[in-house]
Image (cartoon, rainbow, N blue to C red):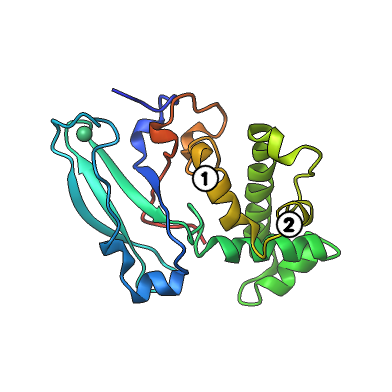
Amino acid sequence: MARHGCPRAGRWPVQLRFKTNLTSEEYVNQQAWQDATLECCPLHPQGGCSFARHGTYERVNPPGTQIPRWYCSESHRTFSLLADCFAARFSGTLCEVETVVVEVERARSLEAAADQLRLDIELPGAIRWTRRRVKAVHACLTILLGLLPELFVGCQPTFSAFSQWLRVDFILPALREIAALHLGYLPPPLGFKPPACSGGEAKRPIQQQTGPDPPALPQ
Ligand SMILES: [Zn+2]
């Protein structure tokens, strides 16, 4: 049986990529989770297990978002398909997370950016919320430079450098496609690496696209 390299990964549902060009609004309006399909059990591709559709779970943003799930009772594992527009383990979309990091890179300080980004909460909370996104995204960019050196030789792990390199409006959705084979090695919000493995290397991710799938999403 193919298992994730991290011994603690088994406690996390496995997240896989739902390749789609839909925006989050289109995804909700079209109820696109009903079209998402997972042909076979990722752990038993030869068949023979009880792998079957297992309802959906709800994401906070945008309201009405449902994420489809499957379950294999033999391996006691749940699988879900996360559409490309969504940030893994962060609320909202990849583009929304990207906007935060771009604002920080343009601002005179992270604190100044946080003060403007989250007018609805106190500054310490806004700083934590902002820093968490900046840290996670910069970690993804740094890992990507190592995973795909032939694509990004000479590029710095900043949004401004990546956007000049890729010449697209939003780089995180583009990077999810570019790094599709490496999503199991990449942490959220871009990839699906389980948080239990954040301190180690994921050696054998399932379909190279595995990760957590928490119904309660951090804000
Ligand atoms: Zn199975």
Q: Residues within 10 Å of mark 1 (few under 14, many from 20)?
A: many
Most extreme residue toward the right is 108
Q: Which amino acid does label 2 sit on?
A: Ser
Q: Based on the displayed image, in which of its 4 quarters is residue 198 positioned?
A: top right
**Residue where numbered disc 1 is placed:** 191
Please give left or right for residue 125 compared with residue 53 in the image.
Answer: right
Q: Is residue 33 shown left or right of residue 209?
A: left
Mark 1, secondary structure of its residue:
loop
Q: Indicate which quadrant contains ligand 1.
A: top left
Residue 149: give x, y in percent of width and height.
Answer: 70, 33
Classify the position of the N terminus by image quarter. Answer: top left
Give the camera-side residue of 51 and 5: 51
Q: In this view, does 56 lie above or below 5?
A: below
Looking at the rendered structure, the secondary structure element under dot 2 is: helix
3D distance between C-alphas at marks 2 and 1? 19 Å
Q: Can residue 88 be seen in this view?
A: yes
Residue 62 shows in the view: no
Q: Position of residue 56 (x, y in %)?
A: 26, 58
- The residue to which callout 2 is attached is 163
Q: In this view, does 33 lie above or below 134?
A: below
Residue 113 percent across, percent down from the top left? 76, 67
Residue at 33% x, 25% y: name it. 2
Q: In this view, does 182 lie to the left or right of 169?
A: left
Question: Mark 1 or mark 2, which is nearer the start of the sequence?
Answer: 2
Q: Nearer the viewer, residue 19 or 68?
A: 19
